[in-house]
Each structure stands twice: as C-alpha cells, then as structure tokens.
Image (cartoon, grey):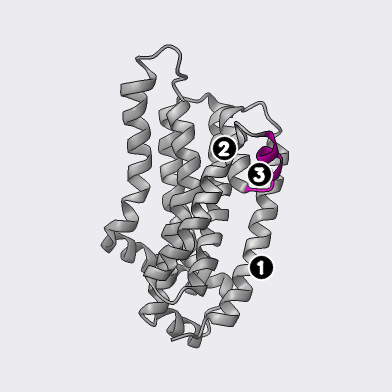
Amino acid sequence: MRSIKTIFIKQAKDMIRNMGVMVQFIIFPAVALIMTILVARPDEYIPNNMFVTMMAAIFAGMALITGMAGIIAEDIENKSLRLLVMAGIKPHQYLLGVGGFILFAATITSVAFALMGGFAAVEFAKFLAIMVAGAATSIIIGATIGIFAKNQQAATGLAMPVAMVVGFVPMISNFNETIERVAVVLHTQQINIIVNDFDANFSRAMGIVGVNILVMAVLFTIAYKKKGLRG
C-alpha cells in the first residue's frame, strides 16, 4: 500500500508540472460548456445535454488513452520505470499508483460533466459510474501502449490511432448498424449507450466494460513483465 501511495503522490506532482496532460482534463468539459451555452440552449431542436454527453464520451475514450501512454513512455524514457522495477514494484502497484491518480483526476472531470448535464440523482449515478469504469479501461489501454513505446513521441504515434478508433467508432455506429454490432464490445460504445439513454441495460453495459478492464489488465501485466526493465 505504501508503494502505491508513493507512486500516486509522484504522479500528482508530475502532472502539476506537465500542463500538456493537465489541460486535457479541462479542455473537454470547457468545450462542452461553451457549446451548450452558445449552440444547444439557444436552439430548441438540439438537446441541452448533447454536447455534454458527446464530449464526455470522447474524453473517456481518447484523451485518457493518449495521456496515459505518454506518462508511461516518459517514465521509461527517464529511466524511472526501470528504477521502480528494480526496487521491486509489482505491475499492479505501478498501475494502481499512476493510473489511480489519473482515474482520480478523470473522476473530477466526470463529475463536472455530470453537473453540466443537470442529471437527476439516478441518472447522475449511472453517468458517473459508467464514465469512471470507462475511464479505468482507457487508462489501462494507454498504459499498455506506453509500455511498448520507446519514447513519448512514439507513444503518441501508437496511441493516437487506437484512441481515434475507440473514441469515434461509437459515434459512427449511430449511423451504421453493422458497425454498431461490432462496436458493442468496446467500452466506449457502452458509455455512448448509457449517457444517451439512461433506460438502457446498465448492468450489461457495466459487465462489458468490466470484461474490457480485465482483459486489458492482463495485457498490461504481460507487457510490464516483458518490457519493464527496458532502458
């Protein structure tokens, strides 16, 4: 527990110094707020929550993958990960420490989205739950990509295509039934379903996201053990 806490605090300090990562947790809700005020509310044909749910889903699917990949790659590039592995830090401790802080920050951003959406109590809880679960999945995906990247630039190059697929496929699925059937396995598709229809099968959505988390956690552990001592 002490190791996880130490890494958590380290990541908090690193993020404060790295405005490039921090701004991603601010820009998406800011854009949602601006678009809601300037576009959605004045137009009676646009749902007030449209930009809130849209930007929330993109944030959970895209920003966290690229951000987390960059963070892990930076630790590798700076030899920090090598030192942590040599100090006996286990994969789950490292992931819970670094990813735990990113998830904490993502939860705050998700609360901001939920408050902007003005959801009722049950809707608020469902929104927050699916967002946090989806954020956790994206964080592990980003961490796994970061482990395989040689440096931060490579991490961005690897993470961006994955993030774009994960982030935009659910939006495309709204217009294509074939893609919709395929996209059902993605955690971002489940976020898209719930935040746009709170009467949808919430248990099923959380179950699919849970499977995503489990699969990605296994892949991260394998990647960590294989690549953790690089550099």
Q: Tag 3, which secondary structure?
A: helix
Q: Position of residue 63 (x, y in %)?
A: 43, 51
* Magenta stretch: includes residue 49: no
Which residue lies under the disc numbered 2? 172
User: Residue 159, how many percent across, how many down?
Assistant: 48, 61
Q: Main secondary structure of the magenta part?
A: helix
Residue 58 appears in view? yes
Magenta-drawn stretch contains 185:
yes
The amino acid marked with disc number 2 is: Ile
The residue where tag 3 is placed is 183
From mark 2 to mark 3, how far is it between C-alphas? Answer: 9 Å
* Magenta span: 177-186
Q: Disc 3 residue type?
A: Ala
Between the C-alphas of marks 2 and 1, the distance is: 29 Å
Q: Residue at label 1?
A: 218
Do the residues bearing badges 2 and 3 touch, measured as CB atoms within 8 Å? yes
Coordinates of residue 19 in the picture (x, y in percent): 27, 57
